[in-house]
Image: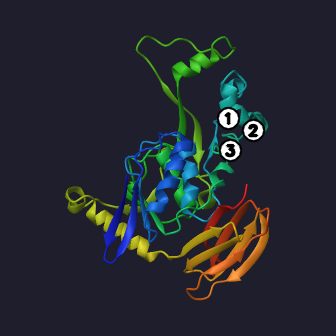
């Protein structure tokens, strides 16, 4: 759900993500399509009651809302003899293989869990870069679960913006889950084969636990959740379409520093005209190599040139020493 919210003489954006159950590729493509349609004054991302879905969809989406490099959550495996045994068997080797060396090492060092390793490729978490340049606030609740937990953790730990939580924390579903039936099927015919359960009996098993990154490095999500600024729903929220909650979110957005960076590429002249607000310097990288660094003075656009043969231009906008905006532009094949 996408809409514009009028507040005084300003417009803010609202993006409701009900689930991360679409395939990551189409999901990210749809977000990239929708973002230019939203006002850039500020954005509310609402993931209340989001039950989760694809981890890659949730964690790859974070980069679209920040100039910072995204560090995804990490996962570890309980270091038991059974985990070491099955880490090389059939399809389980794909799921557990990356943890096999550290599972073996735990025999010597006595660690309770294997090494923490991200499931989402960090390169994929940063392959598109920032698409929305305004301030962002996230809203979740105790029914925000699984990949919703991971999105919340990534939002907070990567410093994207304030997190408002209805209640005190998200649903605390920070683990990968499999079923006994699937595990038994994967181990059929191996030395670790499992017995058949009685009719009508089934189990679900958490076999990898998620831990947070950045300033909360190593903190678990399972059974703990992700805390935010607590919020209690009001009567007007329930009867008038979240009126007080939206007002609270807009106040948070107005308290965040605002900046804008709008580039226009002219491939014929190999120039980029940049309109900027709230920035005082603009750096340019050409295919990952340093280009120019230009001051931004007043409201006048800045025009930058780039060399023939360039493929990707990255623009970084600074306010003092702080990076506020970043855009990646394709200018060549």
Q: CA distance from mark 3 to mark 2?
A: 10 Å
Q: Which residue is mark 2?
A: 102
Task: Depth check: give the residue in front, 148 or 77.
Answer: 148
Q: Secondary structure at mark 2?
A: helix
Find out whether the residues at labels 1 and 2 contact each other: C-beta distance under 8 Å: yes
Which residue is more in the foreground, 223 or 107?
A: 223
Is residue 332 among what the camera can see?
A: yes
Q: Residue at x 69, y 14 (%)?
A: 191
Q: Quadrant of residue 322?
A: bottom right
**Is residue 194 shown above or below 179?**
above
Q: CA distance from mark 3 to mark 1?
A: 14 Å
Assign the C terminus to one quadrant of the image: bottom right
Residue neighbourhood size for the residue with mark 2, other residues' Cα within 10 Å, grouped as few (<14), some (14–19), many (≥20): some
Q: Distance of mark 1 from mark 2, alpha carbons? A: 9 Å
Circle number at residue 79: 1
| Vertical relation: 156 (above or below) 200 | below
Point out residue 70 in the picture as x, y percentages from the top left corner: 63, 57
Looking at the picture, how far across and down is residue 298, in whole percent?
57, 88
Residue at 41% x, 71% y: name it. 252
Residue under label 3: 117
Frontmost of labels 1 and 2 is 2
Residue 153 drawn above or below residue 193:
below
């Amino acid at each position: 759900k996408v809409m514009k919210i009028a507040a005084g003489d300003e417009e803010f954006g609202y993006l409701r993500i009900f689930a991360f159950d679409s395939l990551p590729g189409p999901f990210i493509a749809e977000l990239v399509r929708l973002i230019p349609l939203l006002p850039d004054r500020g954005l509310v991302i609402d993931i209340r009651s989001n039950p989760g879905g694809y981890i890659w969809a949730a964690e790859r989406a974070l980069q679209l809302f920040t100039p910072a490099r995204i560090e995804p959550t990490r996962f570890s495996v309980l270091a038991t003899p059974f985990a070491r045994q099955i880490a090389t068997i059939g399809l389980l080797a794909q799921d557990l293989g990356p943890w096999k060396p550290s599972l073996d090492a735990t025999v010597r060092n006595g660690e309770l869990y294997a090494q923490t390793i991200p499931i989402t490729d960090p390169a994929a978490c940063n392959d598109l870069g920032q698409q929305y340049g305004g301030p962002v606030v996230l809203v979740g609740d105790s029914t925000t679960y699984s990949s919703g937990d991971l999105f919340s953790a990534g939002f907070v730990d990567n410093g994207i913006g304030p997190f408002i939580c209805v209640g005190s924390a998200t649903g605390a579903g920070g683990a990968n889950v499999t079923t006994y039936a699937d595990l038994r099927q994967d181990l059929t015919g191996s030395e670790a084969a499992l017995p058949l359960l009685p009719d009508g009996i089934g189990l679900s098993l958490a076999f990898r636990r998620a831990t947070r990154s950045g300033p909360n490095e190593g903190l678990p999500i399972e059974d703990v959740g992700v805390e935010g600024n607590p919020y209690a729903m009001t009567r007007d929220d329930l009867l008038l379409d979240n009126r007080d909650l939206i007002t609270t979110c807009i106040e948070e957005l107005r308290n965040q520093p605002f900046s804008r960076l709008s580039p226009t590429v002219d491939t014929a002249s190999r120039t980029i005209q940049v309109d900027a607000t709230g920035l005082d310097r603009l750096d340019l990288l050409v295919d990952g190599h340093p280009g120019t660094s230009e001051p931004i003075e007043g409201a006048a656009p800045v025009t930058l040139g780039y060399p023939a043969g360039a493929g990707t231009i990255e623009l970084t906008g600074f306010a003092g020493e702080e990076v506020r905006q970043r855009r990646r532009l394709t200018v060549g094949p």
